[in-house]
Amino acid sequence: MIKYKILRGIVKFLVSIYVRPTFKGTENIPKKGAFVLAGNHIHLCDPATLLTVTKRQVHFLAKASLFKMPQAIIFNNMGLIGVTRDGTDGSAYKKAVEYLKNGEIVGIYPEGTRERGRGLMPFKRGAVKMAYDADVKIIPFATTGRYRPFRKGPVITFGKPYKPQKDLTKSNEELREIIRKMIEKGNKE
């Protein structure tokens, strides 16, 4: 945890200078208890930016291929969870649910990859499944705007907690719609 606090401090400093994000709806982020943080993914800097919004540790799911030296040292000390994209390795899912059952935060991008100008893509069911299985809520978020070095950056808006139901397909569609509307609203502001 000490390594995380030190690394988070460095990341927060760099994000405040380089990214300069604006956060809205932070009152929707619980001060204690487990939850899944789920939203759209527009830029490589998204996870680092989100780590700065709470002092609590966020365990982000990240593609396993990123866990190469030297960044693997940082990723492991930040508590990131490596995920294979082919869906054959259930260890990442088990680890995420374990974190949630221990009262921690798991961050996930349900699209499974960055949007890269394609707009909001279909969601994979991982966010709603892990929230349902761990009996926790999802805090949806929407990232809008642009990353512009050393200038005012993206706006990240956090929505009201969402509780997935047994019908995970329907819950996944509802979560995507919540985030889509948040993006739409953020783009108009």
Image (cartoon, grey):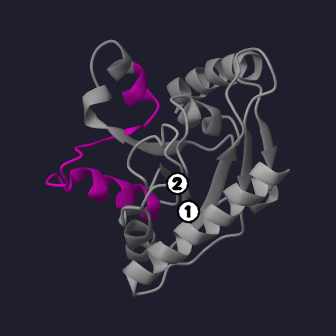
In this rendering, would 137 be left or right of 85?
A: right
The three-letter code of the residue at mark 1 reads: Phe
For image coordinates 39% across by 67% down, the residue present is 130
Give the residue type at disc 2: Leu
- Image point 76% across, 33% down: which residue? 21
Other residues around mark 2 within 10 Å, as few (<14) / some (14–19) / many (≥20): some
Residue 50, position as x, y percentages in the image: 63, 39
Tally of numbered tags: 2
Residue 1 x %, y %: 52, 33
Residue bearing mark 2: 120
How far across and down, in percent of the image, does residue 148 sit? 71, 21
Residue on which the image places disc 1: 35
Given residues 156 and 122, the one toward you in this image is 122
Name which residue lies at 64% across and 55% down.
141
Q: Residue 82 colored magenta?
A: yes
Look at the image and tell me whether residue 187 can be seen.
Answer: yes
Q: Residue furthest bottom?
A: 166
Q: Which residues are magenta?
A: 74-101
Horizontal arrangement in the rendering, residue 107 relative to residue 63 (left or right): right
Q: Relative to 153, say whether 18 is above or below.
A: above
**Distance between the alpha carbons at the discs numbered 2 and 1:** 22 Å
Judge from the rendering whether residue 114 lies leftward or rightward of residue 27; answer left or right: left
Residue 124 at x, y percent in the picture: 36, 62
- In the rendered image, which quarter is residue 68 located in? top left
Q: Is residue 63 magenta?
A: no
Q: Are discs 2 and 1 less than 8 Å apart at CB? A: no
Count neighbours of disc 1 (C-alpha within 10 A) and say few if under 14, some if 14 to 19, many if 20 or more: many
Q: Would you say residue 137 is visible in this rendering?
A: no
- Residue furthest to the front in view is 118
Q: Secondary structure at mark 2?
A: loop
Residue depicted at x 56% and y 78%: 163
